[in-house]
Amino acid sequence: MNYAELLFPDFSLILAGYLVCRLTALNRSVWQPVEALVYYLLFPVLLFHSIVKTPIEVGEMSRLMAAGLAMTAGGIALSQLLARLPGLRQRIAPREHAGAAQVAFRFNTFVALALADRLAGAAGLQLVAVLVGVCVPLVNLAAVWPMAHHGNQRVLRELARNPLVIATVSGLACNLAGLQLPGWATPPLQRIGASAIALGLMAAGAGLQWGHLQHNRTLSAVVLTIRHLLLPLWAWALVRLMGLDATQSAVLMAFSALPTASSCYVLAVRMGYNGPYVAGLITLSTLLALASLPLALGVLR
């Protein structure tokens, strides 16, 4: 498989968003409302529809869900433990770590859904939607908890207001309850999903920033090493331990090597942390995914 050709459509949209934002009158003042539209409306609708449209066979997907949760939990644990090692602890400020640690284990779901569709079609899309459904509440809890702790904010309130948590939990509940959407609702929801992926990738490109990457090199190296090297290696071990089939293996390996979520920046700013620094980490993570995705899908797989 030509992985450069596989990744080109998504990263070309990210590059297009970056160039349009920097070189035309469609600057950050235009893209910030687009980010809000995608994050609060279009993307939750896409997640909900992807989960609800096909009945989930829990028995068939149980090993994939367990592997996804184990991989995510491993990333969360590493992001907390590595920053507390004797050689690193003195070089990483606790508050900076609380705002940036989320970069190590959160994932860009726009890229995940786009890749899954090309890797395995509709089956891959549903597998990723299920992974997102079970992992989003966990990663949001792990991201919000340290920031809320350091900022004296309420964790449960932040989670209850998160649109991705609401969409995935409600989608899983409807699917497992056997509820189906009416036929007339499918075409508009499919169009909303297509627009969510395209706009989400372009908005991620428009939000790329470089200026603050020098802020804390040690912390940057720790979180990006976890995101783009240790998580793919951990996923590779889980694939073998749990005996996943070929499609599930491909989806989990791609899932492990994704760039971090562009919404890390939104969450950091909203909770009073260093947003520009987190935006720089997102930028570098997006570029590193050009290496980690071929590593996960080619070398390790």
Image: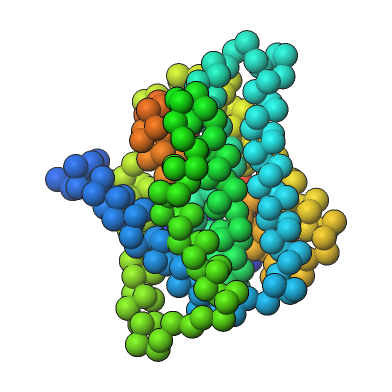
**Which corner quadrant holds the C terminus?**
bottom right
- The answer to which quarter of the image holds residue 67 is bottom right
Q: Give me the residue at 56% from left, 61% from top.
A: 133
Colour basis:
rainbow
| View extreme (bottom): residue | 183
Q: Is residue 80 left or right of residue 137?
A: right
Q: Residue at x 69, y 26 (%)?
A: 82
Q: Is residue 221 visible?
A: yes
Q: With 160 as the anchor, is 29 left or right in this view?
A: left
Q: Residue furthest left?
A: 25
Task: State whether residue 150 is above or below residue 158.
Answer: above
- In this rendering, does residue 213 appear at all? no
Query: In the rendered picture of this protein, how many numbered marks are placed on residues?
Result: 0
Q: Quadrant of the N terminus?
A: bottom right
Q: For the view shown, which residue lies furthest in the top direction?
A: 90
Residue 28: percent from left, percent from top = 23, 41
Q: Position of residue 223 (x, y in %)?
A: 59, 32
Question: In the depicted view, which residue is nearer to us: 128 or 56?
Answer: 56
Task: Say which of 271 and 122 sits in front.
Answer: 271
The percent position of residue 175, horizontal first and vertical second, equals: 56, 75
Residue in the picture at 50% in, 23% down: 150
Q: Give percent across and percent down for residue 219.
A: 56, 23
Q: Is residue 258 above or below residue 189?
A: above
Foreground residue among 51 and 107: 51
Q: Which of 239 and 142 lies nearest the eye of the viewer?
A: 142
Which residue corresponds to the image point at 36% horizontal and 47% vertical from the top-left?
205
